[in-house]
Amino acid sequence: MKTFNDLEFKPHPRGSGIISRIKFDNGYGASVVKGPDTYGGNEGLYELAVIDANDQVTYETPVTNDVEGYLTEEDVTVLLKQIQNL
């Protein structure tokens, strides 16, 4: 199982913050970001979106039907495990 510690963050292409994208064997993945324009970024927290096999954000999974914000590293790990179990 992949966890927060497996994420490799890079500078966000929009110029502020950081981003990591990870894909799983089941075709799903996650985009995890932190920055001044993200939910919780100003508090040092992360935002996560589920991505589908086409690398597009999807709102149609049992994990979430929206972007999840205000996440700790532990919260991100919980969601990553749920995505891997889809």
Image (cartoon, grey):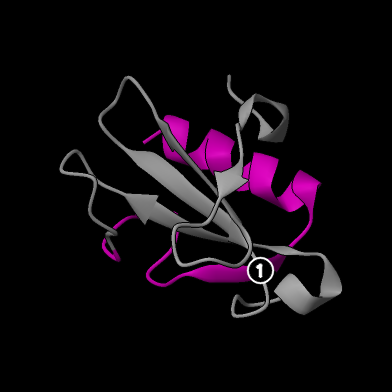
The residue that label 1 is drawn on is 35
Give 7 or 61, whichever is nearer the viewer.
Answer: 7
Give 27 or 36, whichever is nearer the viewer.
Answer: 36
Q: Is residue 76 magenta?
A: yes
Residue at the farthest front position: 15
Q: Is residue 36 left or right of residue 80?
A: right
Decide: is 76 above or below 80. Answer: below
- Few, some or many residues within 10 Å of mark 1 (<14, 14–19, 20+): many
Instruction: Determine which quarter of the picture holds residue 8.
Output: top right
The percent coordinates of residue 10 (x first, y second) are: 57, 42
Q: Amino acid at mark 1?
A: Gly
The percent coordinates of residue 4 (x first, y second) are: 69, 35
The percent coordinates of residue 22 (x first, y second) are: 45, 34
Q: Quadrant of the N terminus?
A: top right
Q: Is residue 84 left or right of residue 3?
A: left
Q: Quadrant of the C terminus?
A: top left
Q: Is residue 83 left or right of residue 54?
A: right
Residue at the farthest left position: 54
Secondary structure, mark 1, is loop
Decide: is 51 above or below 44. Answer: above
> Start and end of the magenta stretch?
59-86
| Residue located at (51% from left, 40% from top) | 82
Decide: is 70 above or below 8. Answer: below
| Residue located at (77% from left, 47% from top) | 73
Decide: is 52 above or below 61. Answer: above
